[in-house]
Image (cartoon, grey):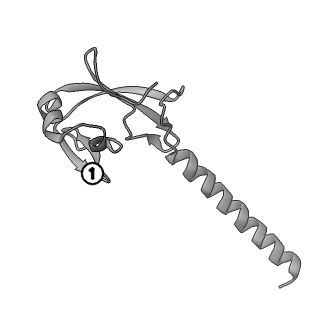
Amino acid sequence: MGMRKVYTLVGICFGVACLFLMTFLAAHNINASGATTAAISQDIIISKIYEGGVKDIVFETPNGDYYYINRGLEQGFTLSGLEEKLLNKSVTLRLTKKLAGVSKHIHQMQVGDNIIYSELN
């Protein structure tokens, strides 16, 4: 195989690797402020609350979907306190829409007009 073919093959592999990396970063980037035009609101009913990841608080819906507050247990929340306030209730979440779909990371959570959690501002 000539050197020209080797350089072409290396260039193609590099280009494909860059495209995969850019797609991965775009799909998994979490905007901590949530202040983006791609932010959406979603209403859910919470059927289960538990710890997941590293001190994350996970909220599960009756159909098995889940959303989380990153390191929520380090922010003064307790599972029992949240269960008392939120279990089997409808809440409104503010989430970010990503290339790969809607993020599971909660930027804001509220029940009616009462904001339970917010990392906005």
On screen, residue 2 above or below 61:
below
On screen, residue 4 above or below 76:
below
Which one is in front, 49 or 55? 55
Residue 38 in the image: state x and y as whole percent: 51, 29
Q: Quadrant of residue 3?
A: bottom right
Which one is in front, 117 or 30? 117
Residue 10 in the image: state x and y as whole percent: 76, 72
**Residue lying at 14% horizontally and 32% vertically, measured from the top left:** 87
Residue 36 in the image: state x and y as whole percent: 53, 28
**Residue lying at 47% horizontally and 35% vertically, measured from the top left:** 97
Left/right of residue 48 with respect to residue 72 in the rendered view: left
Left/right of residue 6 with respect to residue 57 in the rendered view: right
**Residue lying at 20% horizontally and 46% vertically, measured from the top left:** 50
Left/right of residue 46 with respect to residue 32 in the rendered view: left
Which one is in front, 69 or 74? 74
On screen, residue 4 above or below 90:
below
Q: Which residue is mark 1?
A: 52
Looking at the rendered structure, the secondary structure element under dot 1 is strand
The amino acid sitting under disc 1 is Gly
Q: Quadrant of residue 7?
A: bottom right
Question: Which residue reaches farthest top?
Answer: 113
Q: Quadrant of the N terminus?
A: bottom right
Total marks shown come to 1
Question: Mark 1, residues whose alpha carbon is within 10 Å: few (<14), some, or many (≥20)?
Answer: some
